[in-house]
Image (cartoon, rainbow, N blue to C red):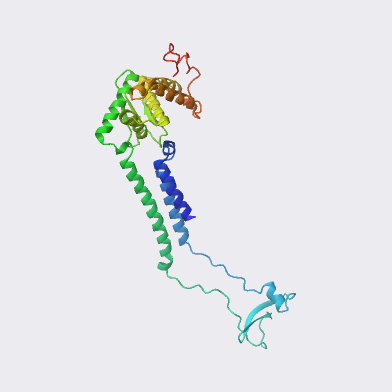
Amino acid sequence: MRILVRLGLAVFVLAWIFGPYELRSAVPIWLPFLIALGLELNLFVAGLRPVQPTRPNRGPQAADRERYGYADDVEELVLVRDGDEELWIPYSGESDEEEEVSPLDLSPVAPEESDGRRLWPHLRRFATGLALVSALALLFWAVERNTGWNGLDGGTRAEAAARFSAEASRVAEKRVTIRCDEGGDYVGAVQHADGVGLVGGRLAYLTPERCLDLYRLAFADEVRFNRTARAIAVLAHEAWHLRGVSDEGTTECYAFQSGVGIGERLGLSRDTAERMMRRQLADNALQTNNAYRVPPDCRDGGRLDLRPNVETFP
């Protein structure tokens, strides 16, 4: 059990680091470490509890009664030693005339064990588990520090954020600022949001993961279709909030349309940008959160069509 728990923790941490973004956004990384630490403590405490010894049945078994001719005898039988031979004999209590016999003591004699010797194996196992948890935490810290958005130098991050802000300002039709929430104070797994912006305000936050996807597109010409598409849609979504649109479904509809232009300016071809936003629109229909579902008017020629004279949508 202990080995399976540790193996499961190691697999999960590696999957969290190198796996899909959906896993990182759904499960905070501290949660599996907290569960693993709790399990190690539980196993350690359980090992310290004294084990109640089970006393064996010292009475004769059915085979013994049958062997010595007492199968139908209900009297108590006692195991005694006659020289080198052990015998079961009936016993109804001592009398003055009976020859004194000494029943065999069949109780198991447990070797005395000092508290230190009994505690050491549990301490060793607990220390091993704690070392594994610490090693995985150190691995996560090293990977997170040297890769991803946080792995970029400060000047590069500032330049990228300025580029994102310029794109958002075009959509919001005023000067706004996009910041990447590196501390996880406003967006991320805990808040269950990839971005947040005050309706009508001038400041919005994106998760570092979305900022990294946008950076890879704009600065490294690296495209990961679904992740890149979602990052563009999130940036456009928050820009429309800053512009003053509050309804989430309407904001999503506008974001998919504006996302085509944002994608082009960040380095995509027109065809790829349109396919990305059409994919986002199709995925929106699968949303379980109705607040983000686009209204029926989000279609070509509909009330929310920003370009009614253009046949393509979004």
Q: Is residue 233 above or below residue 125?
A: above
- Residue appearing at x 43%, y 66% in the figure: 118
Query: Which quadrant of the figure has residue 219?
Result: top left
Q: Is residue 92 left or right of residue 162?
A: right
Quadrant of the snapshot with the C terminus: top left
- Residue appearing at x 31%, y 21% in the figure: 169
Q: Residue furthest top?
A: 309
Count the marks.
0
Q: Is residue 202 above or below residue 68?
A: above
Q: Position of residue 72 (x, y in %)?
A: 75, 74
Camera sees residue 108: yes
Q: Position of residue 232 (x, y in %)?
A: 38, 26
Query: Which quadrant of the figure has residue 280?
Result: top left
Q: Position of residue 12 (x, y in %)?
A: 44, 45
Depth check: 2 or 89 in front? 2
Q: Is residue 93 above or below residue 137?
A: below
- Residue appearing at x 39%, y 35% in the figure: 188
Depth check: 14 or 83 in front? 14
Q: Residue furthest right?
A: 72
Depth check: 121 or 138 in front? 138
- Residue appearing at x 43%, y 54% in the figure: 40
Q: Is residue 152 above or below residue 114?
A: above
Q: Position of residue 217 (x, y in %)?
A: 34, 29
Camera sees residue 177: no
Query: Which quadrant of the figure has residue 14?
Result: top left
Depth check: 118 or 97 in front? 118
